[in-house]
Image: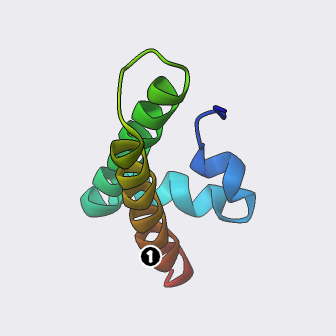
């Protein structure tokens, strides 16, 4: 079963302005968001069957996406 791409602005509407501002001003934050987007897109491609991958690889990518998201949320809460 596949899901849509996890969009940070949609997942965290309460932080929408902070996400936009930090992406423009903070290179580290912007890079984290880019990694999150790329990882999430890769997961969706695998789930849709566009890219072959095993269950272990998909599980690892999901864990990575969650780790990146946790770091993003921690930075957002610190602002």
Residue linked to disc 1? 75
- Relative depth, front residue between 9 and 57: 57
Camera-nearest residue between 67 and 2:
2
Q: In the image as oriented, which residue stretches furthest toward the top? A: 50
Q: Position of residue 64 (x, y in %)?
A: 36, 58
Name the residue: 55% across, 21% down.
Answer: 48
Q: Hey, which quadrant is residue 18 in on the image?
A: bottom right
Name the secondary structure under disc 1.
Answer: helix
Answer left or right for 70 relative to 68: right
Question: What sort of colour scheme is used for the picture?
Answer: rainbow
Q: Is residue 67 above or below residue 23?
A: below
Label tally: 1
Quarter occupied by residue 17: bottom right
Where's residue 41, x and y in %? 45, 32
In the displayed structure image, the side of residue 30 where residue 48 appears, left or right: right
Q: Position of residue 35 (x, y in %)?
A: 33, 47
Q: Identify the residue shown where x is 39% and y is 62%.
A: 68
The residue positioned 52% from the left and 51% from the top of the image is 20
The image shows residue 30, relative to residue 43, as above or below, that is below
């Amino acid at each position: 079963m596949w899901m849509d791409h996890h969009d940070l602005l949609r997942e965290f509407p309460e932080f929408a302005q902070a996400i936009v501002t930090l992406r423009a001003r903070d290179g580290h934050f912007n890079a984290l968001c880019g990694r999150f987007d790329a990882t999430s897109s890769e997961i969706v491609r695998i789930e849709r069957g566009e890219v072959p991958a095993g269950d272990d690889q998909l599980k690892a990518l999901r864990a990575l996406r969650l780790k990146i998201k946790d770091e993003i949320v921690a930075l957002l809460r610190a602002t």
